[in-house]
Image (cartoon, helix red, strand yellow):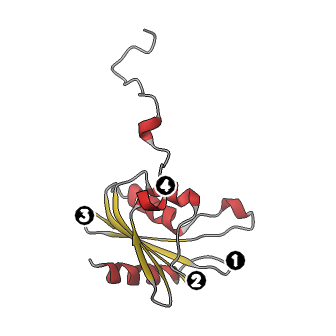
Amino acid sequence: MNDKDLTARAAEFRSRAYAPYSGFSVGAALLGKSGKVYGGVNVENASYPVGICAERAAIAAAVTAGERAFEALAIIADSPVPCAPCGMCRQMLVEFPIARIILANTAGDVCVMTPAELLPHAFGAAVLPEKETAHEDPHR
């Protein structure tokens, strides 16, 4: 699937967003290595921090379906410039291997980036101490 088709899928998903408070609907389409596309939309809540962004919703849908490796993610909103993910979503994006992130707006502007370009010097698993496995005695 090419970037234009994936962005079109994100636009389709965007029509299902639940954004009664901000009026800012966002759609995301995540292309798995399997070729399957997972959709996500922003879902707002009267208690604002309780909502979820489209990007994280798409990743959650994919992981729930058992997929954890991705080719691309397209994000689209009616914004003056291509819609970039928030900080929380950027952190989630660097957790998974995604080759490219397609940022778009409804006017047709597009910018393609990698997760590392979106969040340089990201916090990740490499900085965490190694965990003991179930095979090791935790009392040594």
Q: Secondary structure at mark 3?
A: loop
Q: Residue at x 69, y 67 (%)?
A: 45
Secondary element at tag 4: helix
Q: Label for residue 134?
A: none
In this rendering, does residue 122 appear at all?
yes
How far is mark 4 from mark 1, CA to CA?
A: 23 Å
Pointer 4: what residue?
92
Residue sitting nearer the eye, 127 or 62:
127
Vertical side of 111 occupied by 120: above or below: above
x, y (%) of residue 103?
45, 75
| Discs 3/2, front | 2
Callouts 2 and 1 close, C-beta under 8 Å: no
111 with respect to 46 (left or right): left
Residue at 31% in and 56% down? 69
Q: Counting residues from the N terminus, which is met first, the one under dot 3 or under dot 1? A: 1
Q: Which residue is mark 1?
A: 22
Amino acid type assigned to the residue bearing label 1 in the image = Ser
Dot 4 amino acid type: Met
State how far apart marks 4 and 3 are (Cα).
Answer: 20 Å
Disc 3 and disc 1: Cα gap in Å? Answer: 34 Å
3D distance between C-alphas at marks 2 and 1: 13 Å
Residue type at tag 2: Ser
Q: Amino acid at mark 3?
A: Ser
Q: Which mark is residue 34?
A: 3
Q: Disc 2 or 1, which lies upstream in sequence?
A: 1
Screen quadrant of the C terminus: top left
- Which is closer to the viewer, label 4 or label 3? 4
Residue found 35% across the figure and 78% down from its top: 6
Say if mark 4 contacts mark 2, CB within 8 Å: no
- Give neighbour class at mark 3: few <14, some 14-19, many 20+ (Cα, 10 Å): few
